[in-house]
Amino acid sequence: MKIAVCVKRVPDTEARIKVGADGKSIDESGVKFVLNPYDEFAVEAALKLKEAAGAGDVTVVSLGGDASQETIRTALAMGADRGVLLKVDGGTMDPLPIARALADELKAGGYDLVFCGKLAVDDSSHGTGVLVAELLELPVVSAVSHLTIANGKGTAEREIEGGVEVVEFELPAVVTTEKGLNEPRYPALKGIMMAKKKPLEVKPITLGAGGLEVESLAYPPERPAGRIVGEGPDAVPALLDALRTEAKVL
Amino acid sequence: MADILVVLEQRDGTIKRVGLEALAGGRALADKAGGAVHAMVLGPPGLKTDVAAAHGADVVVVTADEAVRLYQGNRYAAAVAARAQGGAYAAVLLGATALGKDLGPRIAARLGCPLAADVTALEYDTGIVVSRPVYSGKAVYRLRVTAPTCVITLRPNNFMPVEATRAGTVEPAALPVAGNRAARTVQVKEPERAALDVAEASIVVSGGRGLKDPEQFKLLEELAAAFGGSTAVGASRAVVDAGWRPHAEQVGQTGKTVSPNLYVAVGISGAIQHLAGMRTSKVIVAINKDKDAPIFKVADYGIVGDLFEVVPRLTAEVRKIRGN
Ligand SMILES: Cc1cc2nc3c(=O)[nH]c(=O)nc-3n(C[C@H](O)[C@H](O)[C@H](O)COP(=O)(O)OP(=O)(O)OC[C@H]3O[C@@H](n4cnc5c(N)ncnc54)[C@H](O)[C@@H]3O)c2cc1C
Ligand SMILES: Nc1ncnc2c1ncn2[C@@H]1O[C@H](COP(=O)(O)O)[C@@H](O)[C@H]1O
C-alpha cells in the first residue's frame, strides 16, 4: 500500500498570535511552530494501515518555506518513510492554488490513499484535502472519525449534526481526518534519530495566483468587559436579572 | 450580473435554519450589488421549499431525486456546479455545517474558484469582502474576492434569518448522472437520544472537569431542560477525552464552533482552545470556583462559586421564569 500524507507547519495552538507591522500577516518571531494537530491523526492513520498490512510506503508532502522541513522530519520521526517539500516563498489565503500544487505532486505518485487533516489550525481553510481529491478526481470522505480499509475498499464514518454518516468508497481515495480517529504516537528517540537519515526531497515551485486578497489581519473585536455578578448561589437572582434586562437573552 | 446562489440544506425534508441565515447574507449582498438571489435545494421528491421564497429567494432551484435522500457529496457538487457553471453567480453561499464544509470545496474545485470557509461577516463595496476568524479565533482576516466567483461557507448563528417575501419561482433541475468513482453515503446513524446539536442550539450549557464525575452532568441536563426550547449540552475536551461525554458535544478547537445567544460555561477553565470554539457567542456566562480562571476574561457575567451549589439554584430559578 502506497500512502501519502499532506502535512502543514502551523503555530502551536497555545502560541500568542501577534499581528505583524504590515497588518496583513502574523509576526512569527518567538512563535513555536508544530505539525498541524489534525495532520497528526493523518500520519497516524497512514502508519497504522502500513503496519497492519505489514508492508507499504508512507510519503509526507508539505508545501511551505524551508522551515517546513522540520515539520516533515516530525512526521518521519513518527515513522513515515520519505518526505517531499514543495518549497514556496510566501503563501496565499486561497486554498485552491495550494491544492493544485499538492495535486500536481500527488498525481503521478500512484498512491492508494492520500490523507489530509480536516483543517489546518492557522488559516482554517477547511477544504484543501477535499479540493485535492476533486482535482485528482478521486473519491473523498472528509472529517473522518472512524475508518476501515480492506480489499481495496473503505468504510468511513463522519460526524454530522445529530448523527453519523457512514460512507463507502473504493481506493484510490482521499480521506481527511477528524479528532477521535486515533491516538497519534509521539516520536520516540530512535525514530527521531532515524528520521535524520530518511530521504527528504526539496522541490521549489511557484504558487498560482489566488482569488482572495488580504485586506487586513486584525484582532477579533474585544468582548466588552464582563463582570462578576456575585459569589455562590445567592448571586443567581442577580445573574438572571442581568440576562433578562441587560443582555435580553431570556 | 451579481446574482448570488444559496445552497440550502435539508434533513428529512425540512430546510435547516443555517440555509435561511445564508439567504439573509445572500440577500444583503445581492441588494447592494443589484442582483437576484437564487436558492438551490436537493433532496427526495416531495420537498417543501416555501420557506426559501419567504426568506428572500427570487428563484428556487429544486433537484428532487431519491438518489439524494441522504447527502451525497459528489452528486450534490455536480448539481450545484452545473447550475453555477459559466460564471452565472458572483458567489455561492452555504452554511458552514458538516455538509457545507464538505460540499463547499467540492464546488470550488469544479468552478476553479476560491473558497472562503467559516465566514462571520460579508461586506460589499466594489466587490465582496469576507471576514474569517483564523488562528483559533485569535485573529480575523478580511479578504477581498478578486475572482469572478467564489464559494463562501457561513458560520452558523452569525446571520439572522430575515423574512423578505420574494417570488421564489420554482425551477426544477435534474440531478446530473453519477460519476463512476465516488464515495457513497449508505446510512446515517442517529444517536439513541436525539439531542439537539451544540452548533445549532441558541442556548448551550457546557460542562468541564469541574463537574468531577460523568454522573454530575445530569445537573447540566436539568439546567438545559429548564431553559427549554433550543438548548443543548456541550463539553470541554477534558471531559470528552475522559470519556464522560461524546465528541459530538465538544466545543473548541478540535470540537465544534458555536455562536449561541447564550453560552453557560460550568466548571470550565477557559483554555485558549476552548475559547476558540465559543468566543463568538452573543452572551457568555461563567460559573467557576476560581476567581482567576481565564474563562472570566471572556465572560459577560460570572458567578464565583461552587457549581454544585450554584447550578441547582440556577435551575430552580430558570424553571420559575420559563415555567419548564
Ligand atoms: C491541540 C489542542 C486542541 C484542543 N482542543 C480543545 C477543544 O476543542 N476544546 C476544549 O475544551 N479543549 C481543547 N483542548 C484542551 C484545553 O487546552 C484544556 O485542557 C481543556 O479545555 C480543559 O478542560 P476543562 O476546562 O474542562 O478542565 P480544567 O482546565 O481542568 O478546568 C476545570 C475548571 O473547573 C473549575 N472547578 C473545579 N471544581 C469546581 C467546582 N466545584 N465548582 C466550580 N468550578 C469548579 C476549576 O476552577 C477549573 O477552572 C485542546 C488542547 C490542545 C493542545
Ligand atoms: N501548505 C500545505 N502543505 C501540505 N498540506 C497542506 C497545506 N495546507 C493544507 N494542507 C492539508 O490540508 C489540510 C486542511 O487544511 P486547510 O484546508 O488549510 O484547513 C491540512 O490538514 C493538510 O493536511
Image (cartoon, grey):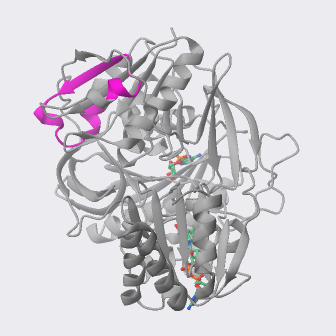
Q: Is residue B9 above or below residue A146?
A: above
Q: Position of residue A74 (x, y in %)?
A: 59, 66
Q: Position of residue B316 (x, y in %)?
A: 44, 81
Closer to us: A154 or B151: B151
Q: Is residue B131 above or below residue B218?
A: above
Q: Residue at x 23, y 43 (%)?
A: B183
Question: Looking at the image, can residue A183 be seen?
Answer: no
Closer to us: B233 or A246: A246
**Bounds of the magenta segment:** B52-76
Q: Position of residue A221 (x, y in %)?
A: 73, 50
Q: Position of residue A129 (x, y in %)?
A: 44, 45
Q: Quadrant of residue A5?
A: bottom left
Q: Quadrant of residue A9?
A: bottom right
Q: Residue at x 35, y 70 (%)?
A: B324
Q: Residue at x 58, y 79 (%)?
A: A236
Q: Residue furthest top?
A: B1
Answer left or right for B274 relative to A110: right
